[in-house]
Image (cartoon, grey):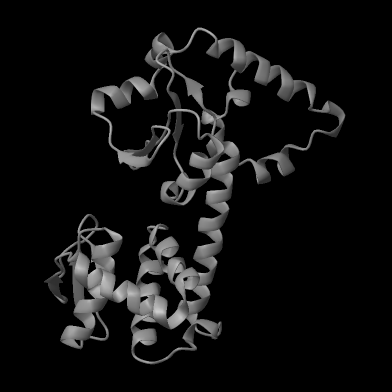
C-alpha cells in the first residue's frame, strides 16, 4: 500500500487525489503528516500542496456533483476522522473514474460512513451556534473559548459574522489552537501567542474583563434559573441536548 503524506490542509488532501491519478495508484491512502507513522510494510510518497492542482480537482468535482455536494467532502475533512478521510478519498477516486452514482449507493460502506460523519459534523456545527457564550473585555472585544469535537469553526464563521456584524469578536478553539476573528468587516483566522492564550484560559482574563460583564453574566444566570421549572427537571434529557463537555464554557453552568 502506498501512503500519501500531506500537510494536513484540505488543499493538500485534494492534491492527493491529483497525485493518485497522475501515478495511477488507485489504492493509495492519504495521511496527514501530523499523525503519520512510518511503516516497514508500506511505501510512502510526500505530497506537496499545489493550489493550482487542488483547484483543478475541486472544479472537476463541482462539475460532476455540484457545489453543494462537493462541499460535503470539505465537511467530512473537518471531522478529522482518519477512517472518514480514507472513505472520502476512495469515493472521490470512484467519482473521477466515472462512477457518478456511487454517492447514492448506501449499501457501500464508504458511502454510509461518510453520510454518518456528515451528520455528526452538522450536529456539532449546530451546537456551536447554540452554545457559544461571549464575554466582553475592557477594550470592547467579545471573546469565546470552545473545544468542539470536530473542526467546525470554518462552518460557523459566516453565521456569527451576520449575527454580530456590528461587534468585534473572537471565537477561539483551544483544542486546535486557532480561532476566527471578526473586525466588523472580514473574518480572519488567527493564532494566539501561548502566553496570551493561557490568559484567556485562566481566571486572569477576568482582570481585563469589562466591568459590566459580571453584571450581565449574573442577569443571564437569573434568567436561566427563572425559566427552569424544578418540578419538571429531567437531567437525562437535558444532558442529551446539552452534553456535559460543553458546560465549562456556558455562563449559566458556572457557580
Quadrant holding the C terminus: top right
> Could you say where residue 209 lies in the image, as x and y percent from the top left?
45, 13
In the image, residue 195 sits, relative to residue 122, either above or below, namely: above
Total residue callouts:
0
Question: Quadrant of residue 21 in the image?
Answer: bottom left
Point 32% across, 42% down: residue: 189
Where residue 235 appears, as percent x and y from the top left, is 73, 37
Residue 232 x, y percent position in the rendering: 85, 34
Residue name at image x 60 percent, y 10 percent: 215
Give whichever of 147, 51 is nearer the camera.
Answer: 51
Residue 157 left/right relative to 175 = right
Task: Please tell me in which quadrant of the rendered image residue 175 appears.
Answer: top left
Q: Answer above or below: position of 209 versus 69.
A: above
**Coordinates of residue 9 in the picture (x, y in percent):** 27, 58
- Taking the spot 43% from the left edge, 17% from the top edge, the residue there is 137
Q: Is residue 29 something that shows in the picture?
A: no
Q: In screen coordinates, is 29 left or right of 105?
A: left
Give me the residue at 27% from left, 75% from top: 56
Query: Does 107 appear above or below 79?
Result: below
List the single residue furthest toward the bottom.
98
User: Where, quadrant-wise, is the N terminus in this rendering?
Assistant: bottom left
Q: Is residue 204 visible?
A: yes
Amino acid at each position: 500500500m502506498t501512503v500519501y503524506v500531506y500537510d494536513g490542509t484540505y488543499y493538500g488532501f485534494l492534491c492527493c487525489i491529483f497525485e493518485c491519478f497522475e501515478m495511477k495508484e488507485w489504492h493509495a491512502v492519504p495521511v496527514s503528516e501530523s499523525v503519520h507513522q512510518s511503516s516497514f510494510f508500506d511505501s510512502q510518497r510526500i505530497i506537496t500542496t499545489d493550489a493550482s492542482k487542488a483547484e483543478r480537482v475541486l472544479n472537476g468535482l463541482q462539475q460532476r456533483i455540484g457545489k453543494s455536494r462537493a462541499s460535503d467532502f470539505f465537511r467530512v475533512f473537518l471531522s478529522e476522522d482518519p477512517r472518514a478521510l480514507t472513505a472520502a478519498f476512495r469515493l472521490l477516486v470512484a467519482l473521477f473514474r466515472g462512477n457518478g452514482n456511487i454517492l447514492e449507493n448506501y449499501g457501500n460502506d464508504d458511502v454510509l460512513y461518510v453520510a454518518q460523519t456528515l451528520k455528526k459534523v452538522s450536529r456539532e456545527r449546530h451546537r456551536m451556534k447554540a452554545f457559544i457564550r461571549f464575554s466582553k473585555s475592557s477594550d470592547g472585544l467579545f471573546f469565546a473559548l470552545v473545544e468542539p469535537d470536530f473542526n467546525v469553526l470554518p462552518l460557523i464563521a459566516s453565521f456569527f459574522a451576520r449575527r454580530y456584524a456590528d461587534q468585534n469578536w473572537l471565537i477561539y478553539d483551544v483544542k486546535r489552537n486557532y480561532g476566527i476573528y471578526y473586525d466588523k468587516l472580514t473574518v480572519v483566522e488567527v493564532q494566539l501567542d501561548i502566553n496570551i492564550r493561557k490568559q484567556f484560559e485562566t481566571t486572569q482574563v477576568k482582570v481585563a474583563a469589562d466591568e459590566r460583564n459580571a453584571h450581565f453574566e449574573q442577569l443571564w444566570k437569573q434568567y436561566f434559573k427563572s425559566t427552569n421549572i424544578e418540578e419538571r427537571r429531567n437531567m437525562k434529557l437535558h444532558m442529551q441536548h446539552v452534553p456535559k463537555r460543553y458546560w465549562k464554557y456556558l455562563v449559566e453552568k458556572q457557580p
